[in-house]
């Protein structure tokens, strides 16, 4: 088997565009994704779904169907695409990616890796968030896209961010019974976002979409409360509603399903596993790998693109994927740097245009401190090991200064998700308890396997012949 030039991890718009561009430049490309179909979060299951005829209600919206071009480009390419393949490790010396497909595990070496692992929804640890009937807004959307399933019963949505608004509108278009929209964005957020508005006006299409969604929500008559605080899901065996405070008054909405959302954050498990440099992005309170304009990371053999390098949206992800692939092609001498720069110029311009709206959105939807470092001692933080806020704060009091020590003290972050769900909150709580910047506390040290896998698969690991021969 010839050596793979580049392995792309993640088949969202960023990863697909990177893979297709690298293929077009004559590189041998392997594209790996744990989902059964390509498209990532935004274009999930697009290849399986049928666009409604014009005039019919379009629940998922035009931005979804536009992804058809991305999927078609992958199908028309020579890229080797492996679906339902979860990356469980990336080895640095020599560079190789391990992935598991069902009962079989593989290790494939490559000259370059492009990480396009995207984003996931920030955990929203509030009272009652572990009750049956409480989900993230994105997971309700996953069901709509992949199974055509629309939730029944009374639905309340709470939190903030463009995806929360989008899901509310999609549910309304699907005829779901939305009984409340609780917006946690504060007046202070709105004020500080205003200074970024002139730049955001350079991407008027995105702002117009946001305003159209606000109008759809307003005209639906769904009770909406702004600047809510003290969110708490109520119920004993399952959720029966959500409590909140707004304008100094307490309120409660009875609901059968509560959808929480406070923005999305980059997937850093793979980039952490590779020990790449990371930086804290304060406006949205998340870590992201430090990358240059071509997506190049602190390891010259690894590029990071799309939302996994900082939240920028689908079209910016697609442009950054192509930009990184051009850089890799130049490094592997398939292009001169002059050719690379010439082809990339329009992509840079497109990405810059798409990103103009980000500082505005990032301030407007800045996550509330209480979500990032909850004070309520009874809130569960690590859902896998059921570790609560009180236990984490108590561990700090007896000398556990960072998330890695905390693992030993409490098993926090040692369950099946390997800290992916609780990592940000744990660092936030520890920084708050110690009264130091979050950078000083750091993040979990990530170790393989980053995804659950059968031990039998590991024992029978299939290693590509190029690597095995070393
Ligand atoms: C739940 C959710 C729903 C969203 N819905 C919308 C929407 O409707 N409209 C919109 O405009 N934006 C949406 N977004 C934001 C949008 O997804 C992104 O802006 C855009 O898709 C980013 O593209 P990307 O290629 O960087 O990553 P993604 O599209 O997220 O693709 C990343 C891919 O990497 C794969 N991956 C990650 N880790 C591994 C691993 N260890 N092994 C193998 N594969 C892996 C994932 O399966 C995924 O397919 C959503 C985000 C989330 C989190």
Image (cartoon, helix red, strand yellow):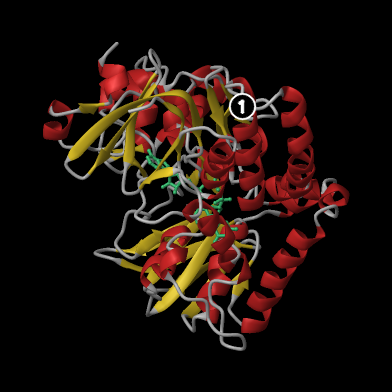
Q: Is residue 35 left or right of residue 435?
A: left
The quarter of the displayed image where residue 181 is located: bottom right
Q: How many marks?
A: 1
Q: Is residue 171 above or below residue 103?
A: below
Q: Is residue 229 visible?
A: no
Mark 1 is surrounded, within 10 Å at the Cα level, by few (under 14), some (14 to 19) or many (20 or more) other residues, namely some
**Mark 1 = which residue?**
334
In this rendered view, identify the residue nearer to me: 114 or 137: 114
In this rendered view, identify the residue nearer to me: 284 or 275: 275
Q: Is residue 215 visible?
A: yes
Q: Residue at x 55, y 63 (%)?
A: 68
Q: Position of residue 417 (x, y in %)?
A: 31, 39
Q: Position of residue 281 (x, y in %)?
A: 63, 32
Q: Position of residue 27 (x, y in %)?
A: 52, 32
**Outermost residue toward the bottom in this view:** 55
In this rendered view, identify the residue nearer to me: 36 or 373: 36
Q: Is residue 327 above or below residue 421?
A: above
Q: Is residue 264 above or below residue 208?
A: above
Which structural element holds mark 1?
Answer: loop
Q: Residue at x 22, y 34 (%)?
A: 105
Q: Quadrant of the C terminus?
A: top left
**Outermost residue toward the right in this view:** 198
Q: Is residue 108 above or below residue 382?
A: above
């Amino acid at each position: 088997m010839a050596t793979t030039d580049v392995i792309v991890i993640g088949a969202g718009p960023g990863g697909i565009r990177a893979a297709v561009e690298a293929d077009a430049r004559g590189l041998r490309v392997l594209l790996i994704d744990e989902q059964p179909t390509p498209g990532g979060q935004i274009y999930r299951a697009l290849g399986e779904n049928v666009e409604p005829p014009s005039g019919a209600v379009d629940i998922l919206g035009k931005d979804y169907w536009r992804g058809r071009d991305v999927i078609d480009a992958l199908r028309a390419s020579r890229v080797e695409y492996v679906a339902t393949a979860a990356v469980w490790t990336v080895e640095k010396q020599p560079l190789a990616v391990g992935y598991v497909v069902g009962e079989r595990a593989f290790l494939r070496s490559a000259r370059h890796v492009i990480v396009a692992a995207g984003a996931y929804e920030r955990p929203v640890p509030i009272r009652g968030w572990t009750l049956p009937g409480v989900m993230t807004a994105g997971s309700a959307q996953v069901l709509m896209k992949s199974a055509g399933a629309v939730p029944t019963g009374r639905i309340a949505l709470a939190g903030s961010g463009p995806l929360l608004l989008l899901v509310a509108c999609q549910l309304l278009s699907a005829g779901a019974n939305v009984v409340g929209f609780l917006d946690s964005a504060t007046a202070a957020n709105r004020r500080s976002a205003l200074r970024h508005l002139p730049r955001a006006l350079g991407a008027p299409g995105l702002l117009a979409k946001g305003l159209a969604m606000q109008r759809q929500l307003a005209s639906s008559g769904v009770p909406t409360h702004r600047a809510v605080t003290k969110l708490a899901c109520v119920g004993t065996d399952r959720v029966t509603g959500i409590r909140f405070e707004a304008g100094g008054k307490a309120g409660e909405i009875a609901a059968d399903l509560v959808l929480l959302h406070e923005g999305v954050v980059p997937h850093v498990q793979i980039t952490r596993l590779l020990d790449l440099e990371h930086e804290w992005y304060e406006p949205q309170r998340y870590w992201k790998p430090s990358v240059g304009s071509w997506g190049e990371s602190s390891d010259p053999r690894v590029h990071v693109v799309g939302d996994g390098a900082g939240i920028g949206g689908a079209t910016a992800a697609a442009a950054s994927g192509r930009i990184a692939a051009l850089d890799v092609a130049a490094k592997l001498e398939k292009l001169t740097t002059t050719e690379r720069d010439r082809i990339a110029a329009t992509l840079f311009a497109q990405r810059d245009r798409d990103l103009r709206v980000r500082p505005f959105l990032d301030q407007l939807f800045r996550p509330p401190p209480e979500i990032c470092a909850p004070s309520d001692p009874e809130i569960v933080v690590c859902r896998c090991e059921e570790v609560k806020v009180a236990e984490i704060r108590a561990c700090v009091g007896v000398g556990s200064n960072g998330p890695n020590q905390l693992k030993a003290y409490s098993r926090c972050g040692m369950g099946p998700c390997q800290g992916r769900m609780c990592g940000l909150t744990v660092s936030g709580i520890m920084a708050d308890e110690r009264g130091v910047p979050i950078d000083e506390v750091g993040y979990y040290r990530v170790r393989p396997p980053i995804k659950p896998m059968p031990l039998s698969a590991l024992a029978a690991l299939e290693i590509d012949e190029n690597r095995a021969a070393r």
